[in-house]
Amino acid sequence: MSFNIYMPTRVIWGRNCVADNADVFSSLGNRCLILTGGSSAQKSGALDDVTNTLKKSGISYTVFNKISANPLVSVCHEAGAAARDCGAEFIIGIGGGSVLDAAKAVAIYAVDETLSPIDIYKRTYNGNPLKVALVGTTAGTGSEVTAVSVLTNDETGFKKSISGSDCYAAVSFCDPEYTYSMPCDTTISTAFDALAHATEGFFTPKMCMPLEPFARTAISDLVEFFRRLGAGEEITSSLRDKVYYASLCAGLVINTCGTAFPHPLGYILTENYGIPHGMACAAFYPALIKRASEFAEAEKLDLFASFVNRSVDDVIKVLVPFIDIKNVKITREEAELYAARWDSGVPKNFTASPGGLTKEEAVNLLCSI
Ligand code: NAP
Ligand code: FE
């Protein structure tokens, strides 16, 4: 056995964890830039909790509320300038994965005004990124615990991540109550993202024993979430708490293992058809577990079966009713055009997938949805 695990973010979980940990904000500085999307930071109650806590601690703040889903490098660049303008000593991101990922990028843009928006992909810059505090409001991406920021390059329109130890938040506040205001479709899509993370990561060669309890919790609780939903149960607060916890467990799995082919293929559905990230990955989930049952080692398959207590076909039956890709149809010509980005080599997510995945197989999968 060999493994290499690093995750330095302080993770604070629990009801009221923002208000109860004012000292943690004080330890980051006296002035900050708060990033949000359009409305979820208010709707979830997280923005009020954060600003009240900052006021009590004498920390001044400016709010930048222009972060969209699938955040653009140009907007993160603009927020970096706003951070410099207000003399921010740290960044707070309040929202779903889009805002959390943006916060990691803004912390870098803020310290080097010579960076152009796309320079962030070069991964060299002057200075040390500002410290980042994250406050999650969706239960899916696990960005709270990953060294990854997924950005959209507005020059190409492609989603492309940056990753590295400079992308870890200093602290992530995880109050499951902030996820309660998510509408049903976002709840389902983000839960699919978490399930994709745990399952894709689990079937990569980097999966290792210390991560097994996280993969087990995430996969079993998320499949159970969909089973209960399919049985007509309501999404209760205790169910939501479980899903948020599962998303963090799944984040710990991908943080070490990375993802497999559903993620890069899903990006194509998001970029070209506006399918939300988690749902876009879910479109390829059945193909992933079918390939796993064909190519993964028997021991791994047995372990997966023990997590879900059902066959691969039954897992697919539980999930399929929730996979809604709005009748996306991709012709072979279109699929080949999308796949041109892999002309110079397939991404490492393909290689890490069960049985590997060639560009031709990726084209077939795109056409088959
Ligand atoms: P999101 O794009 O952050 O948010 C989706 C929508 O949900 C937005 O309209 C948002 O509103 C709304 N929303 C968020 N929380 C809400 C709440 N509590 N109540 C009501 N509405 C709420 O969705 P996401 O799935 O969490 O993040 C997706 C992004 O994360 C993608 O770019 C994906 O590639 C990335 N990702 C990153 C990692 C990683 O490791 N870093 C892993 C997987 C995915 P507002 O616009 O008002 O905020
Ligand atoms: Fe994801």
Image (cartoon, rainbow, N blue to C red):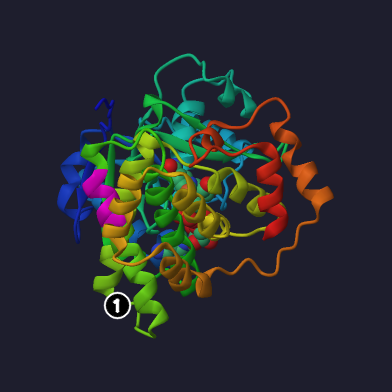
Q: Quadrant of residue 113?
A: top right
Which of the pair 135/193 is nearer the observer?
A: 193
Picture coordinates of residue 184 (x, y %)?
A: 46, 74
Q: Residue at x 26, y 65 (%)?
A: 241
Which residue ends up furthest to the bottom in the rendered image? Answer: 232
Picture coordinates of residue 82 (x, y %)?
A: 52, 36
Q: Is residue 52 visible?
A: no
- Give, as a single range, the part of the protein colored magenta: 212-218
Q: Does residue 216 show up magenta in the picture?
A: yes
Which of the pair 65/203 is nearer the observer?
A: 203
Which of the pair 365/243 is nearer the observer?
A: 365
Picture coordinates of residue 284 (x, y %)?
A: 56, 55
Q: Please state if 305 lies on the left or on the right of 199 as rendered.
A: left
Q: Which residue is mark 1?
A: 236
Q: Is residue 33 visible?
A: yes
Helix, strand or loop at mark 1: loop
User: Which kind of residue does numbered mark 1 sit on?
Assistant: Thr
